[in-house]
Image: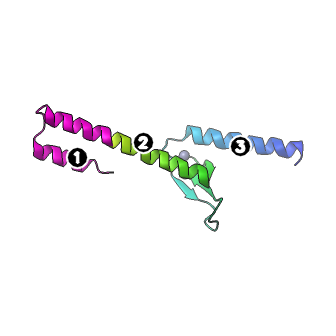
Amino acid sequence: MTPDDAKVLWAKVQANSKALEACAKPHVFVSITPERKLGGRWRCTLCGGEVEQLHRYWYERGLAHGRAAALRKVREAFVKAYQGGALSQSDLLDAIDSVKP
Ligand SMILES: [Zn+2]
């Protein structure tokens, strides 16, 4: 790799990071290397940014964990509303049922 090659590569890395950071999010990654079972590459359909398979995996896991935590908080708020008399038991069950993951 020549110094010029390195500069081009570095510019691509920076442009990719900039696209990913500027994305409306959450990223919607699709495989751009479906022929590869390991070490694939994924591109966001919103921003065009690309990530390696392992980074995409942990990104998706983080989203799932965050969504689960948010749902727990919503359910806890519904239970508090029920305990405070703001919701009937039937409304509580409907409310909890409405926030399924
Ligand atoms: Zn994106």
Side of 57 relative to 1 (left or right): left
Q: Are marks 2 and 3 in contact (CB under 8 Å)?
A: no
Query: Is 56 situated left or right of 99 in this image?
Result: right
> Where's residue 59, x and y in %?
53, 47
Which residue is farthest top?
84
Residue 49 magenta-highlighted: no
**Residue that numbered label 1 is attached to:** 96
Instruction: Please name the residue shown 20% across and 34% down the image.
Output: 80
- Residue 48 position within the rendered picture, expressed as x and y whole percent measured from the top left: 60, 49
Secondary-structure class at tag 3: helix
For numbered disc 1, what is the local secondary structure? helix
First in residue order: circle 1 vs circle 3: 3
- Lateral position of residue 22 relative to residue 1, left or right: left
Other residues around mark 3 within 10 Å, as few (<14) / some (14–19) / many (≥20): some
> Most prominent secondary structure in the magenta stretch?
helix
Amino acid marked by disc 2: Gly
Numbered label attached to residue 66: 2
Could you tell me residue 45's position as x and y percent?
Answer: 54, 52
**Span shown in magenta:** 72-101
Question: Cα distance, mark 1 to mark 2?
Answer: 18 Å
Q: Going 68% across and 41% down the picture, which residue do you hit?
A: 15
Mark nearer the N terminus (2 vs 3)? 3
Decide which of 90, 44 is in the foreground and name it.
90
Q: Given the image, on which type of amino acid does mark 1 rest?
A: Ile
Q: Nearer the viewer, residue 70 or 26?
A: 70
- Distance, label 1 to label 3, CA atoms, is 44 Å
Based on the displayed image, in which of its 4 quarters is residue 67 positioned? Answer: top left
Question: Which secondary structure lies at badge 2?
Answer: helix
Q: Is residue 54 above or below residue 89?
A: below
- Give the number of the disc on residue 13: 3
What whole-number distance in Å separates the C-alpha atoms at marks 2 and 3?
27 Å
